[in-house]
Image (cartoon, grey):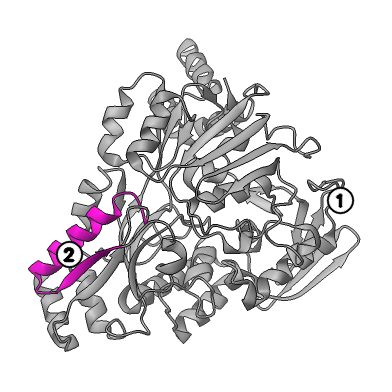
Amino acid sequence: MTDQLDRMIETVRRGRMTRREFVGRASAMGITAGLASALFSKTALAQEAKKGGVIRVGMAGGESTNSLDPALAASEVPYQVNMTWGEMLVDVNPDGSIDNRIAEEISSSPDASEWKFKIRAGVEYHNGQTVTAEDVVATLKRHTDEKAQSGALGIVQGIAEMKAEGDMVTLKLVAPNADLPYLMGDYHLMIQPGGGVDNPTSGIGAGPYKVVVNEPGVRHTFVKHANYFDSTIGHADEVEILVINDNTARTAALQSGQVHMINRVDPKIVELLKGAAGIQIRAAAGRGHYVFIMHVDKAPFDNNDLRMALKLAINRQEMVDKILGGLGSRGNDFPINAAYPLFDDSIEQRDFDAAKAAEHYKASGHDGSPIILRTAPGAFPGAVDAANLFAASAKAAGIPLEVKLEPDDGYWSNVWNVEPFCASYWGGRPVQDQMYTTAYLSTAEWNDTKFKNAKFDELLLAARGELDAAKRKGMYKEMAQILRDEGGLILPMFNDFVSGVSDKIAGWVDDPNGELMNGRAQVRCWLA
């Protein structure tokens, strides 16, 4: 058994085995799952990284309208770009623990209403300035300004008072929140000189790479930040992110060696790529979900019977089978699954029911005119096919759902959060509070269903300070049921994050928090 375990550990060191595979095989050998997981983490982190070279990434999810302002990051490429040049107070590890970044120590009052973040000494920006506690406060304050249009607005609105004293940042909250450190790991909250107030699009941060070329919708190139504070991150000399929205072209770029990794591998070709020489398929199950969103404040979606009709008219299992190729699971019209702490699996699963959908559609009094669902190939992998499947199952219920194809370029600025019914996706968040705060709190900038429910808001705020896990779980269950039955979210499926990775890449660790190792693959991996 020792020889077999040694071989498995060596495979992990080379980045050739996922956590799930390692734990599964170790469990079969009689090793407990907890011990196996800990052994995997220790081994993965202890890999000897090689320095140098250029790591190239081919990505879907980029547009000509993208900005370097981290407040505005709304799709995958700007997210990945910002995670390359930026640094936050904290990040979240694949196992769900907090990874201290600019903040080296975190403490709170007993009731979690006041938090202190000690700022790491000597962290340097790309322009040579040193990160200060004042910069942190200025950054957080900028995101509280509604004019900034920040995706983190719902998070920072929960802070009543911010103060910088020496190397310490103190945050006093509107209401206690035991999950605040996770919220500070939101990818919009990149710490910038002076908070980024004067020039939020400068791309100057404290991350492992400096921006060299910024051509939105085309390519982004970076060089190593020589004075970066963490020697375990940033192994390549350079990083290049190429925007390749077309699935076929992106896959060809990986197969030809033009790029070392790609995101959003089309589920239809996963099995084909698994047999390709020099390529690995990495699928990480997590909190990501593909959705259709309705603005509940705009007709005809301001009618809950119509919303319920559409929720019942979607065939979720068909979506998982045909769109995800089985690499995911059914959704239930709220954004939480078993990957989250305090998930309640007793909430009844919603299924396709043409008869009930027809009843609700009739009760809505809708005039029978086409209901327009907007989508684009880049809304999520298989979005157009998913929308057409939705239209077909809705037709079986007598609902006139019509799909309108939009161009990828400009989709996230012209359609998402603008048009009343469209396809979208969410990467999920580490904890329930962050997911609900970002997208369903009444005042959140990214409340993309325009859902406003006083009881929901009340429960969300109360749950933040509830330290009794059972009571908090009950609050989250009630919130889920309110959103599921009254909201504008149609969530048919949770997706695995499926990436294609060259054998020339080492150091890969599957991360349930987001695509391409939660935006960090290019800075944590190295060329083997």
Residue picked out by circle 1: 129
- Picture coordinates of residue 388 (x, y %)? 19, 59
Q: Horizontally, is 282 left or right of 237 in the view?
A: left
- Read off the residue under disc 2: 391
For the residue carrying disc 1, how many other residues have a C-alpha within 10 Å: few (<14), some (14-19), or many (20+)?
few
Q: Which residue is drawn at 58% across and 63% down?
A: 72
Residue 391 on image: x %, y %: 17, 64
- Taking the image as drawn, is residue 128 in sight? yes
Judged left or right of residue 359, residue 297 is right
Magenta highlight range: 379-405
Q: Which amino acid does label 1 sit on?
A: Gln
Front residue of 98 and 123: 123
Q: Kindly identify the residue that appears in the image at 82 percent across and 46 percent down.
A: 123
**Residue at screen point 47% across, 23% down:** 16
Q: Dot 2 lies on which element?
A: helix
* Residue 473, placed above or below residue 443: above
- Label 1 and label 2: CA atoms lie apart by 55 Å
Q: Is residue 188 found inside the magenta-colored segment of the image?
A: no
* Residue shown at the point (85%, 46%) measured from the top left: 128
Q: Nearer the viewer, residue 31 or 158?
A: 158
- Could you tell me the amino acid type at mark 2? Ala
Residue situated in front as seen by the camera: 451 or 389: 389
- Image vertical order of residue 70 relative to residue 279, above or below: below
Q: Where is residue 315 in the image (x, y as percent from the top left)?
A: 18, 60
Q: 275 above or below 88?
A: above
On-image quarter of the N terminus: top left
Residue 325 relative to residue 261: left or right: left
